[in-house]
Structure formats: structure tokens, C-alpha cells
Image (spheres, helix red, strand yellow):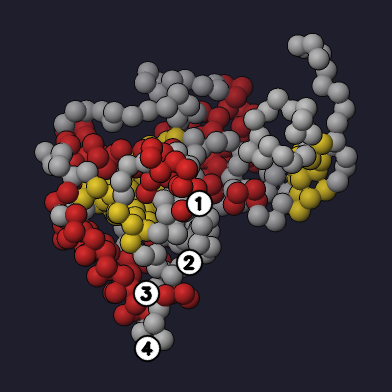
């Protein structure tokens, strides 16, 4: 087919004819052409119930008029400005909205383009924080088995999905993994939920002791388990115990709410129901509802103040972070929520 020629009518894309490097290379994919509400429609006119919202993303469904209007209005004004040189009104407004409803002490939002990027940024923030305060020996993360934090290398390293990690293991940083909070499988018959949670906290403390707590940067966990183990809520007191343990040793708590956050559990942030406040909080899927690629890290003021008083910069960045149209979409989604 000549460049610039119209695409021939098709109802599906065959793996032998596509030039797209699809995630599945042996399957014929239906050609999605429209979406409205809870349904997607392919080129043959077949309608699908988008029951899982893609990858748990489309919290407002497809084609929400207020979100579309906000995106149109933003793209007519400004689609993109590089964040090394400019900020935008819409990014500032979205950050204000997110901080107004954030856990106590959160002061700043670092925008990225998705959940994996948010987790990568959080990991690097933790490392730079300890370098800035004169503790460069802190080099270890501790996370949980049967967890999922994304597919980029840092996020994959802290994640505990064995199948996803296996072939990339030689590329991953060494991370200590402890048991997940999986009451259904792992709580002993004679053990209360609270006692089970404290047993897990004790296991984490043993992991810190083995590494040397002065060498540990952060404990990383999904507040509610997501893409690997299923929906695993923490037992009462589990995260409070972890917060106290981390505080005792000056270790940061990074919570991954990419999937479970932004209203998915009945409060905007799942950690609100646990009565704990993390040092860094990653959000994404429900932030933009699938209308544009966006994620974010919410950071405690004490961390941001260290960066500001020290090097004055976060040594990290991506071309599309803080994208104006993505921020406009997310702001509209949050207003509807």
C-alpha cells in the first residue's frame, strides 16, 4: 500500500498483515472504531460490554461529554509545552485539586504518563532523597511477593509477579521480597486477622534487620492488591504497623494506588481507610480514566523541601510529563468523580 493511500475497509487485523508490534502476535484482533458509555464497537458493528474498563482504566466509560469538551478546549489553546521550560495553567490547576484532597502532608504532584512511570519516579525520588540528606548507603527496596507495580525495569524489580520477572531477571536490581497480606490463603486457623497482620510486620522487620535498616530506602506495596494476586484488602492494623516500623528506622513508605486509588475503594485514596499516610503515593488509572495517558506521584512536603534546599532539582524526567491535554482530561475526570 502506498504511503498516504486510504486504509482499506476491515473488520479485524490479521497477525500476518499488520505492521503494528501488537502485544499478542498470534491472534487476530477486532478493529475498535467507537466507544460510548460502557460499550466498545468494532468495524463489523459488533458491540462489546467493556466490563473491566480496559485495564481497570475507564472509570467514567467512553465518550463522556464533559471530558471530551475539556480536551477539545485545551487542545485549541495549547497541546504541549516542555516542562523543563514552561508550566501550564491546567497542570497547576490539576495539582491544586489533587493536593486539596491528598493525604496529610502531601504538597506536590509529579505528573507522568502512566502507572509504571509513576512507580519509576517514586523509586528514584526515594533514592535521591537519601543522597540529598547524606545517606547514600541506603540502596535497598523491600517489597512483596505476588505484587505488581508495572513493567518498566525498576517497577518490575520491586514487583513480585514471578512470570513477568523471569526472563528479565538478569536486568533487574536486587530487591528483597516478603509475604503479601493474603489473609484468605495464609492466615492460620487459630490466628486473628490482627495477629496475622502483626506476624507480617514482624517478617518485614526481620527483612530490614537482615539488610541493615540503615541501608533500606523504602518499603513498597499496593494498598489493595491488584493485577497479580487479585483484590487483596489488608487486614486491620497491618499498614499501621508497617508505618510505625518504617518511621522507627527512617525508611520511606511508598504506596502504589495505580489500580486501587482514585475512588475505587469508597474513598479517593485507599490508604485513607487504613489510617496511614505514605511518603510517596503513585496514582494513574482512575486519574485520567483512559482519555489520555497520565499518572502521578504525590509527594510529602518534607521530601520536596529536601530537594529544594539541596540540589534544587529532581534528576529525572520524560518528554511528555505534565502534558497539557492529559492534564485537562484528568482534571475533567476528577471533577466528574
Q: Which residue is mark 4?
A: 190
Of labels 4 and 2, earlier in sequence is 4
Q: Residue at x 58, y 35 (%)?
A: 292
- Above or below, 54 relative to 178: above
Of residue 198 and residue 78, the one placed in the foreground of this image is: 198
Q: Is residue 96 visible?
A: no
Numbered tag placed on residue 232 in the rendering? 2
At numbered mark 3, what does the secondary structure look like: helix, strand or loop? loop
Which secondary structure, mark 2?
loop
Q: Is residue 210 toward the left or the right of residue 34 in the image?
A: left
Residue with the mark numbered 1: 163
Question: Which numbered disc, 3 or 1, marks the residue that appears first in the sequence?
Answer: 1
Lower sequence index among marks 1 and 4 = 1
Which label sits in the foreground, 1 or 4?
1
Foreground of the two, 2 or 122: 2
Q: Where does label 3 land, which residue?
A: 236
Image depth: mark 1 or mark 2 in front:
1
Mark 2 crowdedness (10 Å alpha carbons): few <14, some 14-19, many ≥20: some
- Does residue 45 show up? yes
Task: Where is residue 289? Give x, y as percent.
Answer: 59, 45
Amino acid at each position: 500500500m502506498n504511503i498516504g493511500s486510504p486504509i482499506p475497509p476491515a473488520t479485524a487485523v490479521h497477525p500476518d498483515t499488520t505492521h503494528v508490534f501488537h502485544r499478542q502476535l498470534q491472534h487476530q484482533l477486532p478493529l475498535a472504531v467507537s466507544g460510548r458509555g460502557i460499550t466498545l464497537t468494532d468495524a463489523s458493528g459488533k458491540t462489546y460490554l467493556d466490563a473491566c474498563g480496559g485495564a481497570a482504566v475507564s472509570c467514567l466509560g467512553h465518550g463522556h461529554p464533559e471530558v471530551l469538551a475539556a480536551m477539545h478546549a485545551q487542545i485549541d489553546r495549547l497541546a504541549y509545552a516542555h516542562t523543563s521550560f514552561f508550566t501550564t495553567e491546567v497542570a497547576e490547576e490539576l495539582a491544586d485539586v489533587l493536593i486539596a484532597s491528598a493525604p496529610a502532608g502531601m504538597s506536590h504532584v509529579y505528573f507522568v504518563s502512566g502507572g509504571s512511570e509513576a512507580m519509576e519516579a517514586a523509586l528514584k525520588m526515594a533514592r535521591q532523597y537519601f543522597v540529598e540528606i547524606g545517606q547514600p548507603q541506603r540502596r535497598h527496596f523491600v517489597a512483596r511477593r505476588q505484587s505488581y507495580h508495572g513493567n518498566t525495569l525498576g517497577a518490575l524489580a520491586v514487583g513480585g509477579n514471578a512470570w513477568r520477572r523471569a526472563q528479565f531477571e538478569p536486568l533487574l536490581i536486587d530487591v528483597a521480597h516478603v509475604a503479601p497480606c493474603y489473609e484468605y490463603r495464609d492466615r492460620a486457623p487459630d490466628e486473628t486477622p490482627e495477629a496475622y497482620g502483626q506476624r507480617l510486620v514482624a517478617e518485614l522487620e526481620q527483612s530490614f534487620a537482615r539488610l541493615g535498616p540503615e541501608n533500606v530506602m523504602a518499603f513498597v506495596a499496593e494498598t489493595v492488591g491488584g493485577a497479580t494476586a487479585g483484590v487483596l484488602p489488608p487486614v486491620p492494623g497491618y499498614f499501621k504497623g508497617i508505618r510505625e516500623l518504617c518511621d522507627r528506622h527512617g525508611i520511606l513508605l511508598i504506596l502504589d494506588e495505580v489500580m486501587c486509588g482514585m475512588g475505587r475503594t469508597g474513598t479517593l485514596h485507599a490508604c485513607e481507610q487504613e489510617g496511614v499516610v505514605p511518603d510517596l503515593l503513585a496514582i494513574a488509572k482512575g486519574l485520567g480514566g483512559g482519555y489520555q495517558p497520565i499518572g502521578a506521584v504525590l509527594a510529602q512536603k518534607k521530601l520536596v523541601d529536601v530537594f529544594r534546599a539541596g540540589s534544587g532539582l529532581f534528576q529525572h524526567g520524560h518528554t511528555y510529563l505534565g502534558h497539557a491535554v492529559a492534564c485537562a482530561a484528568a482534571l475533567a475526570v476528577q471533577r466528574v468523580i
